[in-house]
Amino acid sequence: MKRVKIRVFRYNPADGADARYDEFEVEAERWTTVLDALLYIKAHKDHSIALRYSCRMASCGSCGMVINGIPRLACYTKVYELGSDVITCRPLTNFPIIRDLATDFTAFFAKHKSMRPYIINDAVDRIDGREFLQKPEEVEKYLQFSYCIKCGLCYAACPTVATDKRFPGPQALAQMYRYLIDSRDMATDERLKVVDDRHGVWRCHFAGSCSMVCPKGVDPALGIQLLRAYLLGMSRDSKVVAELYRREK
Ligand code: SF4
Ligand code: FES
């Protein structure tokens, strides 16, 4: 067990006071997560701290915050793993602050919805509800992108989102690729029109920070490069483009 100092960002846009950090000392076991520490502080030291969480198991995507400078899930980040006796928690960048560590996901989800994140296929009615069959290699094309839990960490890490509010962001673009490449989806042209824009897929500067912070192993930067390749007619085979991308990295 060790004692650590947790610095918590405090800000309430409604009260007009300046933002500040409040500091709390807590004891952490090897298994204590940053979320555990924050909830201990909330229960025993200052119940007014605002934060969002639900599953406590890296599934719901609610507890994202910037921890020691990097967007992370608080429930998936152990105090010991941070290797520091001072842990600074602040709200996700690129999101408006509701209060303290709680941020507003309205724009993020609106961008996600604008990608029409579902299979579009008029034939569904014509096959009497039977399942569409897919080969393993067809599933492989989109599988990693389907692991996204919409935590917004990639969006917070993206320097392009920070400078262009119309840019959909890595999460939304990767989801666009996920549905575009799905063999059951029939809306290819419609989908490409949404992202083929100077504020769309072409705005990405390929910083790659989105993929560095994803807690689910999704590679949104790869999704964006694959979308571009699709638009350029380079290759409809994601494996070929993925290989080129890996060599670039
Ligand atoms: S791609 Fe990864 S980091 Fe981005 S929202 Fe999805 S799970 Fe979170
Ligand atoms: S509480 Fe659900 S992802 Fe952290």
Image: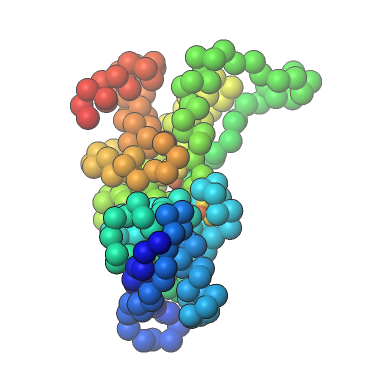
Rendered-image quadrant of the N terminus: bottom left
Residue name at image x 45 percent, y 83 percent = 14
Q: Is residue 198 visible?
A: no
Q: Position of residue 37 (x, y in %)?
A: 46, 66
Q: Quadrant of residue 64?
A: bottom left
Q: Position of residue 33 (x, y in %)?
A: 45, 57
Position of residue 61 relative to residue 66, above or below, is above
Q: Position of residue 215 (x, y in %)?
A: 42, 44
Query: Total of numbered circles in the picture?
Result: 0
Q: Is residue 131 left or right of residue 225?
A: right
Residue name at image x 32 percent, y 51 percent = 157
Residue name at image x 26 percent, y 51 percent = 159
Q: Is residue 47 visible?
A: yes
Q: Quadrant of ligand 1?
A: top left
Position of residue 116 relative to residue 48, above or below, is above
Q: Is residue 102 left or right of residue 249?
A: right
Residue 89 vs residue 93, the one in the foreground = 89
Residue name at image x 59 percent, y 22 percent = 184
Q: Residue furthest right?
A: 128
Residue 224 vs residue 70, the one in the foreground = 70
Position of residue 207 relative to residue 15, above or below, is above
Q: Quadrant of residue 126?
A: top right
Rendered-image quadrant of the C terminus: top left
Residue 69 vs residue 219, the one in the foreground = 69
Position of residue 131 relative to residue 87, above or below, is above
Q: Position of residue 28 (x, y in %)?
A: 42, 63
